Image: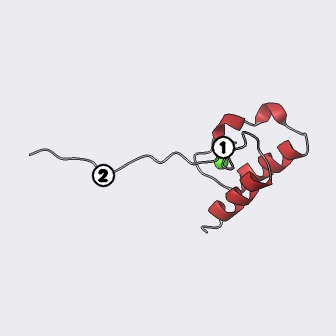
């Protein structure tokens, strides 16, 4: 008998702080990035949802909605 695991690892769409989840820490880092702060602390490759190649308000809204379970 072959047993197949149903466990899968889902990579968060946005995870700037590499915590493994999309959470308020990502929103804070995203807002700091928008303000021109902490550029070296944010892995911008870890989240962009609007398709424009930039981190903007769309990504922050996505983070807040995701972290709120919406
Ligand atoms: Ca995170």
The image's mark for residue 29 is none
Tag 2: Cα neighbours inside 10 Å, few (<14), some, or many (≥20)? few
Applied colour scheme? secondary structure
Disc 2 is placed on an element classified as: loop
Q: Which residue is drawn at 65% across and 39% down?
A: 46
Q: x, y percentage for residue 2?
A: 13, 44
Instruction: Examine the rendered structure and indicate whether residue 13 appears above or below residue 46.
Output: below
Quick check: 64 above or below 10?
below
Q: Which of marks 2 and 1 is in front?
A: 1
Q: Which residue is drawn at 91% across and 40% down?
A: 36
Lateral position of residue 51 relative to residue 13, left or right:
right
The picture places residue 55, in percent across and down from the top left corner, at 77, 44
| Residue at image point 64% right, 45% down | 15
Q: How crowded is mark 1: few (under 14 residues within 10 Å), some or many (20 or more)?
A: many
Q: Can you identify the residue that label 1 sits on?
A: 47
* Residue 28 visible here: yes
* Mark sitting on residue 6: 2
Q: Is mark 1 on a helix, strand or loop?
A: loop
Residue at the extreme front: 52
């Amino acid at each position: 008998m072959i047993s197949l695991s149903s466990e899968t690892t889902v990579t968060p769409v946005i995870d700037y702080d590499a915590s493994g989840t999309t959470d308020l820490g990502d929103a804070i880092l995203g807002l700091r990035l928008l303000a021109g702060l902490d550029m070296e602390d944010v892995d911008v490759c870890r989240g962009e949802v609007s398709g424009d190649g930039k981190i903007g308000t769309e990504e922050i809204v996505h983070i807040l909605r995701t972290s709120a379970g919406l």
